Every structure is written in C-alpha cells, then in structure tokens.
Image: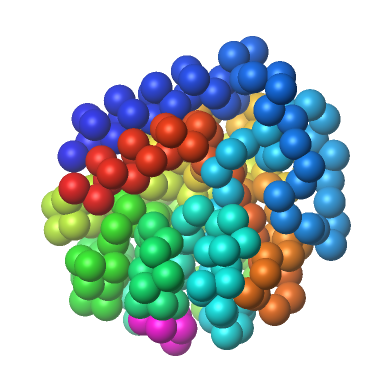
Amino acid sequence: MLRPLIAILACAVLASGCTSASYDLMDKNSLRPSKFKDNDPQSFGTKGPDRHQVHGIDVSKWSGRIDWPKVRQSGVSFVFIKATEGKDRIDPTFETNWRSAAAAGLPLAPYHFYYFCSTADEQADWFIANVPKQAVQLPPVLDVEWNPASPTCRTRPDPEAVRASMSRFMDRLEAHYGKRPIIYTSVDFHRDNLVGQFKQHHFWVRSVAAHPEKIYADRRWAFWQYTSTGLVPGIEGETDINVFAGTDKNWRQWVASAQN
C-alpha cells in the first residue's frame, strides 16, 4: 500500500512544485480568486493556497452540525475527521460525521489527538476499538502537538521518547488498517521533535501566518492547513481549511490508490 502512495505523491510534488523549498514548476497561470472566504485572511505572497486545486477541511465536535452535501457542492474535496483523543476519549460527532461525509461522496480520514501521558499501545487500542475500517478511506492521521492548556496532560517527553511513541502508535495502526498514517503537526512541535524525521510518512502541517517553506525546515509536505478562520458553505461559523500538495489529477490518483 505505501509504495503506490509514495510514488503518486512524489509525482504530485514534482508536478506542482509544492515542497518546502520550491514552487518553480507551478503553472503561473494557476493564480485564481480565493476558493473560500476567510474571516482573517493572511497574505502568503505568490505562494498562497489559492494556487492549489484541491482544498479540504478538518472537523470535530466544535464544528457543530454540518450539511455535508452542501459542503461537497462548495468545492471541498476531502475531510479529516476527529475520532479519538488519548486512551479514553472519542469525539461525540465522529460516527455521524464520517457516515454523512461518506454518503456525500467525500474522501475522508479519521484523526487521533495524541496524549503523552498514555502509552502508545493504550492509545492505539482505543483508536482501533472505536474507528471501524470502513471509516478509514484515506490513511489515518496522528495529530501530535504540544498541549500547554490541557487540564490533564502537559508533559513534554524528550525527542527520542516522542519519536519512539509515535512510531509504536503508527506501526499499530498501519498493521491494522493497512495504510501508513499521515502525521499532522504544528510549528513548535515539529521544531522540537520532527526535523529530518519520518521521511517515509506523509505530513500535514499547520502554518497559518506564513508559507510552510519559511518555518518547516526541509520538510516535504502533502497537506497544508492554512487557516482556522475559513468560511465553508454548510458549516456554521469558522473552520480549518487545508490544501493538497498536488494537482487535481494527482489527487484523484492518490485517492484511488489509498482506497484500494
């Protein structure tokens, strides 16, 4: 499963130039008006998200009730859906969201918010127990970031321990679902733990104030979360919006391979 995904995404990167280092191969005629409105739009210069053809969202209980057919009609191409957190929490809207998004024809992937106060096996067991295989159309996502506001877990292991925990968790999910997980991360967590690591995994990076190439050292990314204040028809209030690194053709190929 991994080799076709890596190969397709490699082609996507070459076709689009969407790496942390270069947009040189991006068609300069691809500039277009913003696909979605934003309550707090940022200027990314000539390398903004509107140069990308494929946009998606990520949702959780905080997104409220969602009109999924309307979301799809708006131009959303994929969705990451929060499933679990730590070793004992499940997002109460997960089942409704993944079933409704799937019924609307949207490719989807569930994500797990990792807590460093529980073991990798405890959290993998929890995810597997609560996320059926049919809800994992695209590779599952491991969300790793520091959580200084948490009332229960603010621990920060050393980088070696962080990476060992991540590896164990992702190995468990890959063995169960047959897809190598995507890693979602934030700027500070990546800087502290992930620079130069996990090169065989696809990365989904958060960067809402500058292009990823400015703040993720030498990181080739597959997905870029560029705003948390976007406005998408079918969702009340603000939501996170993301782009895929490749073209629409690359996207269709990647999804077909991921779902096999």
Q: Residue at x 21, y 76 (%)?
A: 129
Q: Residue at x 78, y 42 (%)?
A: 33
Give the answer, above or below, for where 6 lies relative to 173: above
Residue sitting farthest toward the front: 73
Horizontal and vertical percent for residue 79?
A: 48, 60
Q: Residue 27's quadrant in the figure?
A: top right
Q: Residue at x 33, y 29 (%)?
A: 8
Q: Residue at x 19, y 48 (%)?
A: 260
Q: Nearer the viewer, residue 82 or 231?
A: 231
Q: Residue 180's quadrant in the figure?
A: top left
Horizontal and vertical percent for residue 169?
A: 28, 55
Horizontal and vertical percent for residue 67?
A: 56, 79
Q: Based on the picture, tell me whether residue 172 belongs to the magenta stretch.
A: no
Q: Is residue 57 left or right of residue 88?
A: right
Q: Residue 135's quadrant in the figure?
A: bottom left
Colour mode?
A: rainbow
Q: Is residue 132 left or right of residue 215?
A: left
Q: Nearer the viewer, residue 191 or 129?
A: 129
Q: Is residue 129 left or right of residue 109?
A: left
Q: Is residue 189 left or right of residue 81?
A: right
Give the answer, above or below, for where 192 lies relative to 241: above
